Structure formats: structure tokens, C-alpha cells
Image: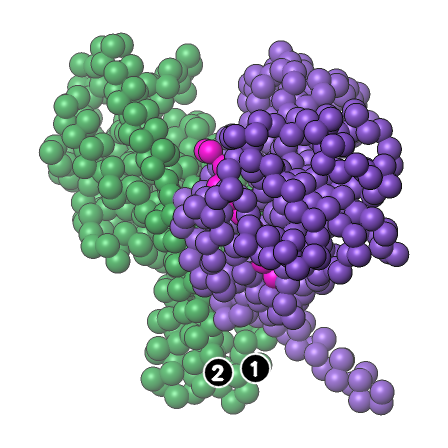
Chain colours: A purple, B green
Amino acid sequence: MPTATPVRRLRERVAQLAELVATPLVPADFVDLLDPLRSGADLRARLVRVTPETSAAVTLELKPGRSWKGHVPGQYVRIGVDVDGVRQWRAYSVTSCTATTFTLTVKAIPDGVVSNYLVRQARPGTVVQLDQATGEFVLPSPLPPKVLFVTAGSGLTPVMGMLRSTELPDVVLVHSAPGPDDVLFAAELRALDAAGRLRLVEKHTDTDGVLSTDELLALVPDLAEREAWACGPTGLLDALEAWWPTDRLHTERFRPSVLVTGEGGTVSFARTGTVVEADGATPLLDAGEAAGVLMPSGCRMGICFGCVLPLREGAVRDLRTGDITTAAIGDGVLIQTCISAAAGPCDLDV
Amino acid sequence: MTAIQKKADNPIAHLSRQDIEALGRDLDAIRERIIGSRGADDAAYIRKVIDVQRSLELASRAVLLFSLLPPAWIAGTAGLSVAKILENMEIGHNVMHGQWDWMRDPKIHSTTWEWDNATPSDMWKHSHNELHHTYTNVLGKDNDLGYGIMRVDEDQRWSPFFLGQPLYNFVNACFFQYGIAAYDLEIGRYLKGRKDKDTFTRQVKGVLGKIRKQVTRDYLVHPLLSGPSALTTLGANATANLVRNLWTHSVIMCGHFPEGVETFEKTSIEGETRGDWYVRQMLGAANISGSKAMHLMTGNLSFQIEHHLFPDLPSNRYAEIAPEVQALFARHDLAYVVGSLPTQLASAWHKVFRLALPNEFFGKNVAAAAPEQVREAA
């Protein structure tokens, strides 16, 4: 277009001028006072509605800033929430969306700092930090003819995102929850089941016990013909993967299982000059944060890689598997600080 | 003052080793309590101060676009002066101390903050947080004692150079931000060959880069944007910078130079325990009394004693712990030095004039020349 270039040039000039006036800050610092959700701003979202789901779960409707790129059902987002004044990042699956908003469904977990805040205290109007949606736990294209979802607790959330957005010809959902009142989206799922859009198998573990693989086969006899997506506690997923080693089974883990604790060591944060003693059970992320180091962080469960930092030198132990990772000077091995503990002296590049 | 160890009536001679360690534990307990109770209210406080400061700066600069009109000049200059003071004191100084790092907000964090001052944040953090706050008032170690150009303690050796120090201090006050930059560059050490040349060159570039940006903003772009009001806007910005410089210099002088503040010999800090360090901080600083607005405008450095005991506690909490700290001073029979701004400023300036002359000028009784110490033993 003939007018595009002069207009763009003018905008660039104005932007340069704004930078000169704003120094040592940047113009965005001032514009954020007026419109934190504008295009070009750091991605944030405003909480517009909080809807109770069960006694311990709520659905949060969020209006993302203009830089939001949308999501694929099944993906999760990381949100940064200030709880007691401290910025905390957590990952939650997107459970539905409209043209301008999307929802997250959060279940309060015991001692969960963020989940309890979101379920019991968060109010509409709050602005939270946001990252673009990410994750591989999504339906393929073309859609498989027969689908099985195996979920437990809040593991239902990514599956709900898929069910709401996609018409699947033949789908079975096996969902575990402590009791009938703890089932998320219960009314909606039971209605879908009644309408014949899916076959819902509810498993109430308080009365029926934990779902076993044999039981699953009995509940879903044509299991071998199905492509399966499973999300829930590590025990369930480990059992499924061991029992059914196939690329037709897709899993998503929400929490790490801590198997091994190492012996700990002295951790140095090279750029800040901070040095702390960390024991073998404390993630390096926690050790750094406790010492006031500005650590990048994300899901805090080893899935999002938002906390990855170069290990300049030293040894760390993966808290989930017990695997030892070592680095010599110059290696700069990237490690996930949220699931890595010191297994000797560590020197981190942060 | 004279190094505490040389005084005939050493004010800490009555403290036993147990007293000092008990004092340390009591102060640690205060610190732990505040750290444990930091929360949403504190976070809301600093965010509000930052929002107010930015809104005030924006509004003042907008009003100054019409600075040809005298009411606009007065309102804009006053607003910009206050905005610059808040930016340097309650926000910049305290954020760079790490007082707000616990919020884990990368936009309000000591590792990312840059301030409206000629000295770049990383240089300032080294000379201020590491050197001054560690070696507070240790003769020969803490260069904040006279900034290397003045004699503010009887135990600093006199030379004829110091005859001019009232003038140096006044000039330094007017151009204080450049004075801090020059001080952080450690020009004296460099000239004596005790500072690495590459480091020095890199730092000089950093300072000049910042000065260029500030000068472009205050003395070129903002005046040009003001059109017919260009010259009056330039004058307004120069005035706001001068007001900010004079104010910050005054507040900082009142922190360590008033009569009653103690200094320490270099050897005295060898093997210093945490309790000893606390005692040194207690006696090495002075507070300014005043209203809430006054405390805000000093960046709560009016609670200099509390700030020196706990440099990384959020500044909005110093007022809360001050009575407890003062009670601890009283219990251990130590002098909590506090006075109004005019009193403390007069006391500090008096010292600058007095010590421009050699000790011998006043005969043997140096103390006779010192004004009455302002002390409040609660």
C-alpha cells in the first residue's frame, strides 16, 4: 500500500521519541498504567468470571491480552498469580473458549498455594501474567475413529477442552474421582452420556477402589482398537504405560513423583554471586528462590521447561528418576531446576 | 566523632560478649518476624508508589509542555521534582537493595532495575550495597565517610585540601547525581593505579551513556516537544534535577554525619560476629523525625538506623519496627540518634565546617567544639 511506508516511518519516529522521553524506563512502563492488555504488551489476562464447579474446584474465565495467539484443545497455559504478594507460576489446562475469553478449571489441592488462592480468593478484575498455550496432549488430524480417555481428578481438564470443542464419533471416557460429588463437570458429562455423544464410565474410588488395568479392559473391551489419551496422577499413568506399551497411548503428567533424594551440596548462582547450601531433597528452583535469586520458573512439576538454566559445573539429581546429570566447565548443560536437586556442588548460570 | 575504640568514654564498653550476642538474637527475631509477615499489603504498597510516581512524572511533563505559563511552570516543576525524588529514594534505592525481590516480579527486582541517576545500577549496587553497607563507618574502609573528598571524622588526617570542604560539599549537593557517579567510578583508586584500566574504561562508558540519555531527555527532547515553551521547560527540568540533588544529598548527609554517630577503627572489625556487626550498624547511623510524607520523601531513609540493621526489609515496614529497635537501644543503654531534618542537617553541616580545620585548631578539647548531641534515650 502506498501510505503504509510513511505511516510506519512516522510510528517508528514516535516510538523512538517515546523511548527518549521514558528513559531509564521504557514507554511500555507508562502505557501499562492505562492498558495492561493492549497489543504488544507482555502477555497478561484479566479474570472476568469465577464459577464454582465442586466444593473444591472453580472455573476461571480469563480475557487474554491482544497478543494472545489462541490454543489447541488439550493444551495448557502457564499463569503467573500474585499470592500474598509473591509471583507464583502454575500450569493449567484450557477447558473451553469463546471468541475473546478462555477458561481454566482449578481444583484446590492440599497445601496448594496457588490452587487454594484461585479457588477461594481470586476475584474478577484481577490481572494475571500469562504465557502462550503449549503442550502436545492434543487430538491429531484426521481424528481417530475410536477414542478412549482415561482421567482422574483434575486430569479431566485437558480432556474436557477436547470434548467441548470436537465432535468425536465414538468416544469412551473413564474418569476416576473420590465420590460422585467430586466429579468435575458432572452434569455436563452425564448429559453428554445421556444424549449418546460419549460413553461415560465414572469410577468412585472412595467406594470402588482405585482403577486397575484389568478393570479397564473389562470396562472397555475394544480397548485395543482405540487411540487413548490419559491424564492424572503419576501412579495411574505409570501403570497404564507399563501395561500398554504402545504409541497409541498419549499421557500427560501433572505432578512429578519424587523417587530419590541425593546428598545435596553447595549451590552457586554465578551471575548474582549468591551461594547457598541445599539438601538433596530441595529442588534448585526452591533453593534459589529462598535465597532471593530471580529464578525463571513455570509449572514446578517438570513439564514446561520454563525453569531451564545452564548448569555450568557440578552434579544434579533428577528428583523423579534419580538420574544424575553432570557438567564440566564449558558444558553449560541445561537442566530443569524445579525437579533437580544438588548432588554435589553446583554452579548455575543465573 | 572519634573512632569508638579511642574514646575515653567508649559507649559500648559496658556491653559484655553475652549482651552483644543477645542483642543480635533480638534483632534477628525482629527481622524474621517481618520477613515472615511480608505479603499482599506490602506488594500493593510498592506497586502503588510506582504507579503514583509514574503518573506524576507523566502528568508533570505534560503540564510542562505549556511551561511558558507561570502556573504551569510552577505546578510542573514541583510535580517533576517530587517524581524524581520518589524515583530515586523510595523506589530506586530500595528496589536495588533487593527489598522487593521476594515478590518475584521481574519488573520490580534488584537485578533488573535501572534508575534515573547518572550512576548505572550495577556500579551503585557494588559500592553501596556491598561496600558501604558491609563496612559502615569503618575508617579507611567505608568511603561514604566524606566520599573521599571531605574529612568528617577527627581521626581522618587533616590536610590543607580540606579547608575547601564546605565549598566541595555545596557543589557536590548541587550536582549530587554526578558526584555519586564519580564516586562509584572510584576515580581516586584508578589514578593511584589500584583499579583495573579495562574495568574503569567500561564503567566510564556506562556512566557517559546514561548521562547522554538523561541530558537528551531533560535538556533536548522534552524542551523541543514544548515548542514555544522550550526554554522554560529546560529551566524547569534543570530546577527539578537541582531540587532532587539537594534533597537527596541532605537526606544522605543526615544518615551518617550528624554528631552522635560513631565511627570504628579498621582493626576493630576483624573477627566481628553478627552481634558486633549489628552494634556497629546501630551506632553508625542517625534517624530523622517527621511526618509520614517526610518519611516517604526520604525513601524511609529517615529510618537510617533500621535500614542499616536490615537493609533488605521492605522500606514501608521500618516505621513499624522503629519503636522496638529504639527500646532495644534503651535496654542496652545505647544512644539512638534522632532529630528533625533542620537539626540534623545543621549538625552535619557544622561538622563539615568544623573539620575543615585541623583538630589542633580547637585545642585539645575537640568535643567542646561539637554541638550538643541530639539524643533520645527512650
Which SS class for mark 1?
A: helix
* Measured Cα–Cα span from mark 1 to mark 2: 7 Å
B206 left or right, relative to B84: right
Which quadrant does the N terminus of chain A fall into?
A: bottom right
Q: Which residue is mark 1?
A: B225
Q: Is residue B17 left or right of residue A162?
A: left
Q: Which mark is residue B65?
A: 2
Q: Amino acid at mark 2?
A: Leu
Membership of B359 in magenta stretch: no
Quarter of the picture holding the C terminus of chain A: top right
Marks 1 and 2, the one that precedes in the sequence:
2
Position in image of residue A255 (x %, y %): 63, 33
Please name the amino acid that badge 1 sits on.
Answer: Leu
Front-most of residues B62 and A286: A286
Q: Nearer the viewer, residue A272 or B343?
A: A272
In screen coordinates, is B232 left or right of A92?
A: left
Q: Are marks 1 and 2 in contact (CB under 8 Å)?
A: yes
Local crowd size for mark 1, using a 10 Å CA cut-off: few (<14), some (14–19), many (≥20):
some
Picture coordinates of residue A186 (x, y %)? 55, 50
**Which image quadrant for residue A188?**
bottom right
Q: Residue at x 80, y 84 (%)?
A: A4
By secondary structure, the bulk of the magenta-drawn segment is best described as: strand
Q: What residue range appears in magenta?
A: A102-111
Q: Which mark is residue A229?
A: none
- Asked if A325 appears above or below A173 in the picture, the reply is above
Mark 1 belongs to which subunit? B
Answer above or below: position of B340 versus B73: above
